[in-house]
Image: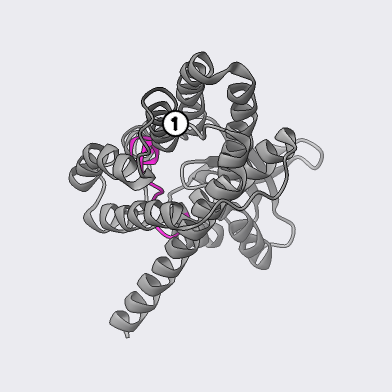
């Protein structure tokens, strides 16, 4: 039974990665190249190299010829420190998206630079999120971002965005700042979509006032593998003793936890607080 579940899970991941690669390549040929944008990260560096080779030296370099070698070093780091399965599936995504980008013809949908920036960024965010939700990545700076997220336990996508701004500044110097500035809008839209869809490194603090603390604690433990601390207090309105459970869980787990708590204690009062950073022991689901 376990083998069937694992096989089904891996097939689902493979389908999501393939879909992510198709979306990536379609976006590259329909929005990014049409608008002359630079997506940032290793994809942006690749386009910077290929467009520079074409513009200044008259050499047409295939996208895959540049993008695949750039990913080798971060892939080796990911293989050693993050996980073998994660790295292999990520490189499958990198290779497939690269070859599809070379194979697909340009498919311009609109010439409006703002529409290209916004919808191109949304499609990139969807593509990267599909990869992350499948337990892999889209390669490039995603390897680096996930490495530091695993080590530090923080959401690093905004730091990646700032690094991409530096890449786009160089692109602006070489090819003009209008396309580079639209690329920053594109990158911002992409980052927001990823943060909305992928919540592995985002955390929330739960303060739960409940009359059934043991049952609620066991529920949190079972659903999230996280612990809780019980604080005894006094409800000032009635002067009655109250039990407060304090726990930090993944943001993607919050809705399920709240729903299940209310099945145990319909009168439970729950305060959800966004957590920026924590130190100390905190359970993280393993990366394969």
Residue 222 in view of the camera: no
- Residue closest to the far top: 173
From the viewer's perspective, is residue 261 above or below residue 167? below
Q: In the figure, is residue 25 to the left or right of 147?
A: right
Residue drawn at x 68%, y 40% is 116
Residue drawn at x 46%, y 29% is 160
Q: Quadrant of residue 95?
A: bottom left
Q: Nearer the viewer, residue 212 or 115?
A: 115
The residue carrying mark 1 is: 51
- Residue closest to the far front: 58
Q: Nearer the viewer, residue 53 or 194?
A: 53
Q: Nearer the viewer, residue 21 or 213?
A: 21
Q: Quadrant of residue 149?
A: top left
Visual colour scheme? one colour
User: Residue 24: where, in percent of width, then height?
Assistant: 50, 52
Q: In the figure, is residue 82 to the left or right of 228?
A: left
Task: Tell me, yes or no, whether the highlighted magenta stretch contains residue 135.
Answer: yes
Residue drawn at x 49%, y 63% is 19
Task: Tell me, yes or no, whether the highlighted magenta stretch contains residue 280.
Answer: no
User: Residue 230: where, in percent of width, then height?
Assistant: 51, 44
Magenta residues, as a range? 133-145
């Amino acid at each position: 039974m376990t083998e069937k579940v694992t096989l089904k899970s891996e097939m689902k991941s493979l389908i999501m990665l393939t879909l992510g690669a198709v979306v990536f390549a379609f976006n590259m040929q329909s929005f990014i190249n049409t608008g002359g944008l630079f997506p940032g990260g290793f994809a942006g560096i690749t386009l910077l190299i290929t467009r520079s080779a074409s513009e200044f030296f008259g050499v047409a370099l295939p996208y895959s010829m540049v993008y695949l070698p750039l990913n080798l070093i971060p892939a080796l780091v990911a293989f050693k420190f993050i996980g073998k399965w994660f790295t292999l599936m990520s490189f499958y995504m990198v290779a497939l998206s690269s070859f599809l980008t070379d194979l697909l013809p340009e498919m311009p949908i609109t010439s409006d630079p703002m529409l290209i920036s916004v919808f191109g960024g949304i499609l990139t965010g969807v593509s990267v999120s599909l990869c992350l939700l499948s337990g892999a990545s889209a390669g490039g700076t995603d390897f680096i971002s996930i490495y530091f997220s695993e080590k530090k336990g923080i959401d690093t996508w905004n730091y990646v965005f700032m690094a991409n701004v530096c890449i786009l500044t160089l692109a602006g110097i070489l090819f003009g700042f209008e396309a580079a500035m639209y690329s920053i809008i594109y990158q911002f839209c992409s980052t927001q979509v990823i943060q909305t869809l992928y919540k592995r490194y985002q955390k929330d603090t739960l303060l739960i006032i409940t009359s059934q603390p043991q049952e609620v604690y066991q529920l949190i433990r079972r659903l999230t593998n996280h612990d809780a601390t019980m604080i005894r207090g006094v409800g000032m309105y009635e002067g009655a003793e109250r039990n407060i459970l304090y726990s930090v869980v993944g943001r993607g787990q919050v809705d399920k936890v709240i729903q299940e708590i209310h099945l145990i204690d319909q009168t439970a009062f729950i305060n959800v607080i966004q957590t920026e950073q924590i130190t100390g022991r905190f359970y993280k689901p393993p990366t394969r």
